[in-house]
């Protein structure tokens, strides 16, 4: 609580604090976790368990029109909460994260992450992507095309117009 969007719309940010954060830090420092490069993946999996619990408490008090979740590795909690409380889920996807991470030595749980990624995206009520290419990728992965909406990233072009912003000095270097 305490955050609002324009129009005085309340926004709830959920993140681990206090003892949860201390316990997660201890797990990340465990030698087995470090030697097997599991820190990031376990943190993501644990976060989903934590989010499921904390999100359920929040949704028991608040009744939003929809849940909006930015796609992240192992992000199944939003989908579970949306079904449990009968609230539509919209997932924002800026990139095919598992594909981006493929081959990265610090990503040992890629098969599990990919399964969760596809399950969530195929079951979401809506998916917002930043490009037509990403929409085509989603559809190729089995996401229903009518559920995928392209909203391109944008920039205010007026900020980069005129003689004061020519770029010549940068190009000259």
Image (cartoon, rainbow, N blue to C red):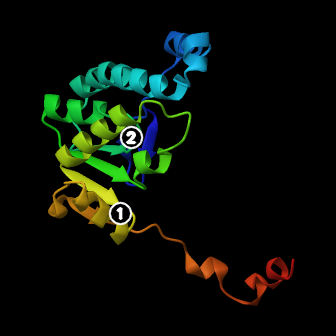
Q: Quadrant of residue 49?
A: top left
Residue at the left extreme, as displayed? 86
Please name the residue shown 22% across and 40% down the image. Answer: 119
Secondary element at image label 2: strand
Residue highlighted by disc 1? 134
Classify residue 134 as left or right of residue 40: left
Q: Quadrant of residue 140?
A: bottom left
Q: Closer to the camera, 108 or 145?
A: 108
Please name the residue shown 47% across and 45% down the image. Answer: 102
Relative to residue 132, is residue 92 depicted above or below? above
Relative to residue 53, is residue 172 depicted above or below? below
Secondary element at image label 1: helix
Q: Position of residue 93 (x, y in %)?
A: 37, 53
Q: Earlier in the sequence, mark 1 or mark 2?
A: 2
Report the Cα–Cα distance between label 1 and label 2.
27 Å
Visible in this render: residue 73?
Answer: yes
Please name the residue shown 39% across and 40% down the image. Answer: 11
Q: Position of residue 164 (x, y in %)?
A: 77, 84
Q: Which corner quadrant holds the N terminus?
A: top left
Q: Quadrant of residue 94?
A: bottom left
Badge 1 crowding class, 10 Å Cα cut-off, few under 14, some 14 to 19, many 20 or more, is some
Q: Position of residue 14 (x, y in %)?
A: 42, 29
Q: Which corner quadrant holds the C terminus?
A: bottom right
Q: Closer to the camera, 154 or 31?
A: 31
Number of numbered tags placed on the structure image = 2
Q: Nearer the viewer, mark 1 or mark 2?
A: 1
Visible in this render: residue 15?
Answer: no
Residue highlighted by disc 2? 11
Q: Position of residue 19 (x, y in %)?
A: 52, 9
């Amino acid at each position: 609580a305490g955050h609002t969007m324009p129009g005085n719309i309340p926004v709830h940010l959920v993140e681990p604090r206090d003892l949860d954060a201390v316990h997660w830090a201890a797990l990340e420092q465990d030698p087995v976790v470090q030697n097997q490069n599991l820190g990031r993946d376990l943190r993501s999996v644990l976060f989903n368990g934590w989010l499921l619990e904390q999100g359920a408490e929040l949704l028991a008090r608040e009744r939003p029109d929809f849940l909006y979740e930015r796609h992240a590795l192992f992000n199944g909690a939003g989908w579970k909460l949306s079904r449990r409380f009968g609230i539509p889920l919209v997932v924002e996807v800026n990139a095919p994260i598992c594909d981006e991470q493929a081959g990265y030595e610090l990503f040992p749980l890629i098969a599990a992450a990919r399964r969760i990624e596809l399950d969530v995206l195929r079951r979401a009520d809506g998916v917002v992507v930043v490009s037509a290419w990403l929409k085509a990728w989603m559809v190729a992965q089995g996401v229903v095309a009518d559920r995928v909406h392209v909203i391109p990233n944008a920039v205010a072009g007026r900020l980069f117009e005129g003689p004061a912003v020519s770029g010549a000095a940068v190009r000259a270097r």
